[in-house]
Image: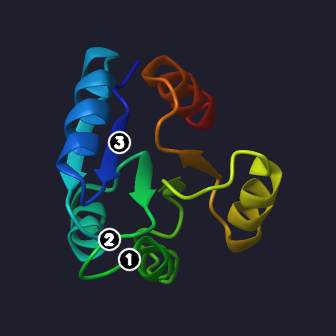
Amino acid sequence: MDKKVILLVDDEPEILYLYGNKLKREGFDVLMAKDGQEGVNVAREEIPDLILLDLKMPVMNGMEAFVELKNDPATKDIKVVFLTAFSDPTVPEIDQKMAKDIGAMDFIRKGIGLDELVEKIRGFLK
């Protein structure tokens, strides 16, 4: 089986480090970008299997990057999951509905367990 490639786009070095290392240990190839514009550039060059995209970032936020990716024929079919720190845990179905309405697969709240993160990502890649 081919190694799945995940692009992790987040401006927080701790998130890149924590999530990136966990995903590498679980057998994924991990690419990283520290803002939305860099994420779009890496996605166009590498065409990852999945993008984990933070919403709140400098230079270009996650929503702007998402729109740019979906409007580009080369990247429009890449699966995208938003990472968010300010999602209300009592109403995750609203986030999921909003994500799906705009064409993303889902939202993942930062702070979930690393094993749960990996489980969700494996599910998205099936």
Where's residue 7, x and y in %? 32, 49
The N terminus appears in which quarter of the rendering? top left
The C terminus appears in which quarter of the rendering? top right
Dot placed on the residue nearer the N-terminal end, 3 or 2 = 3
Between the residue at mark 3 and the residue at mark 2, the CA separation in whole angstroms equals 19 Å
Badge 3: how crowded within 10 Å, few (<14), some, or many (20+)? many
Query: In percent of the image, x 22 and y 26: which residue is there?
Result: 21
Badge 2: how crowded within 10 Å, few (<14), some, or many (20+)? some
Inspect the image, locate mark 3, and give the three-letter code of the amino acid beneath it: Ile
Where's residue 22, x and y in %? 30, 23
Viewer-closest of 90 and 10: 90
Residue designated by label 3: 6
Determine whether 48 is above or below 71 in the image. Answer: above
Determine whether 46 is above or below 50 in the image. Answer: below
Q: Is residue 53 left or right of residue 33?
A: right
Q: Nearer the viewer, mark 3 or mark 1?
A: 1
Viewer-closest of 69 and 58: 58
Inspect the image, locate mark 2, and give the three-letter code of the amino acid beneath it: Met
Residue designated by label 2: 57
Query: Which label is found at residue 61?
Result: 1
Where on the picture, by quarter, is residue 36?
A: bottom left
Viewer-closest of 83 and 77: 83
Tell me the SS state at disc 1. Answer: loop
Inspect the image, locate mark 1, and give the three-letter code of the amino acid beneath it: Asn
